Image (tube, helix red, strand yellow):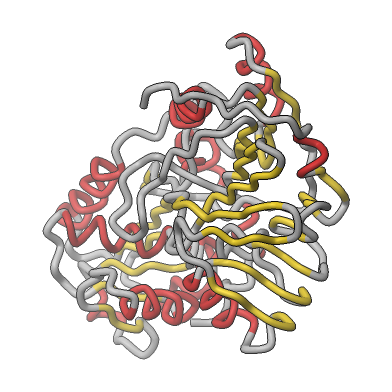
């Protein structure tokens, strides 16, 4: 990506967006972005539960994110809901809001907030890697870029996800008598792994833990090509030899695995770059597949936005702030609390980890 021209504005960024206890507050617009507690008006970047919470008076998000919230929380997840498409402009109070693809999961969005000639882009979670299950990341020029930093250390370089899927398929071929269980978060990661398997030529049925079914079926309804999917519940143990099953991460170390013949446990996560994490969790086949930007993705995106000021949140804030200062950029950590990491240990406590 190449550097873009910075927008020059007359309004101070902190007059537009300000970190408060509930999250990022836009006072001139009368809303919060991804608030961690109920607020009057919430603007939501994507459907993961640490960003999309129930109980708000009104919610603005993409259609897919609103649908994810309905699937998880029921029809009455908010007082009211309004869908917005990518590139569509909406005036809220004194600001103009636009949504742009974030490349994280289906329906994920960066939120651009413009006021008084100043544009701030809140990235939410994002990645610049290819993903067949969602719209690709869109670069949005801005004055201030608010970036996540989940993998904000130079050690985290994810590589090609297709190569990781090739490892999984090689293991399936090597051990046809064993079942393969792939731990993956139920929104985004599971569907991406399935789509990558299909792209690699694997056309056999793929089995799903019960917690995966609802959201995966929604992806299919939205036109994402996932091939034949089957519920694993009720399938005979012997019939699961040589198969691949997707499950929440916690299920792969649970009594639930006893229904499989000599299972090979895999875990699809950017954290699998750290082999100690794989060993600690008893993962036999670590797969470095992440729905977050790695170090190179973060730094190249920051440069390409043309932003002169960077706000860093959700992860390794200090390291990325330091890198920004070495590049002559103003940078600050936001120190927001209440956001987990669906790619890591927080997934163990996720509400999707229910009986199959």
At x 47% / y 49%, what residue is drawn?
A: 102
Whether residue 32 is situated above or below residue 246 in the rendered picture = above
Whether residue 290 is situated above or below residue 44 in the rendered picture = above
Residue 267 % position (x, y): 43, 52
Q: Quadrant of residue 319?
A: top right
Residue 266 % position (x, y): 39, 54
321 relative to 229 in the view: left or right:
right
Q: Quadrant of residue 72?
A: bottom right
At x 70% / y 56%, what residue is drawn?
A: 33
Asked whether 31 or 75 is in front, the reply is: 31
At x 26% / y 49%, what residue is drawn?
A: 165
Counting every numbered tag in the picture gives 0
261 relative to 35 in the view: left or right:
left
Whether residue 28 is situated above or below residue 186 in the rendered picture = above
Residue 192 % position (x, y): 34, 58
At x 45% / y 59%, what residue is drawn?
A: 86
Asked whether 136 or 160 is in front, the reply is: 136
320 relative to 272 in the view: left or right:
right
Q: Quadrant of residue 90?
A: bottom right
């Amino acid at each position: 990506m190449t550097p873009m021209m910075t927008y020059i504005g007359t309004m101070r960024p902190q007059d537009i967006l300000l970190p408060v206890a509930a999250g990022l507050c836009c006072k001139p617009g009368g809303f919060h972005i991804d608030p961690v507690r109920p607020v009057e008006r919430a603007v939501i970047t994507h459907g993961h539960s640490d960003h999309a919470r129930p109980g708000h008076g009104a919610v603005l998000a993409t259609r897919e994110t609103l649908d994810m919230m309905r699937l998880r929380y029921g029809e009455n997840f908010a007082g009211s809901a309004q869908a917005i498409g990518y590139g569509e402009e909406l005036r809220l109070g004194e600001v103009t809001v636009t949504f742009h693809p974030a490349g994280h999961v289906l329906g994920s969005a960066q939120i651009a907030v413009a006021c008084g000639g100043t544009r701030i882009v809140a990235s939410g979670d994002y990645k610049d890697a290819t993903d067949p299950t969602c719209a690709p990341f869109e670069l949005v020029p801005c004055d201030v870029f608010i970036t996540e930093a989940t993998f904000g250390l130079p050690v985290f370089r994810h590589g090609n996800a297709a190569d990781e899927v090739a490892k999984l398929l090689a293991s399936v071929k090597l051990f046809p008598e064993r079942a393969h269980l792939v731990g993956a978060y139920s929104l985004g990661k599971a569907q991406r792994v399935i789509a990558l398997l299909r792209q690699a030529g694997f056309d056999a049925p793929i089995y799903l833990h019960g917690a995966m079914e609802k959201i995966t079926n929604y992806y299919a309804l939205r036109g994402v090509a996932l091939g034949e999917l089957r519920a694993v519940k009720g399938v005979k143990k012997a019939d699961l030899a040589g198969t691949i099953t997707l499950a929440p991460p916690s299920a792969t170390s649970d009594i639930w695995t006893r229904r499989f013949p000599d299972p090979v446990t895999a875990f699809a996560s950017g954290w699998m770059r750290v082999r100690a994490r794989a060993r600690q969790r008893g993962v036999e086949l670590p797969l470095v597949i992440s729905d977050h930007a790695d170090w190179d993705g973060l730094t190249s995106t920051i440069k390409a936005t043309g932003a002169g000021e960077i706000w860093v949140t959700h992860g390794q804030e200090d390291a990325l702030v330091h890198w920004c200062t070495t590049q002559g950029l103003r940078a600050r950590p936001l120190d927001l609390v209440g956001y987990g990491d669906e790619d890591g240990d927080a997934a163990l406590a996720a509400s999707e980890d229910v009986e199959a």
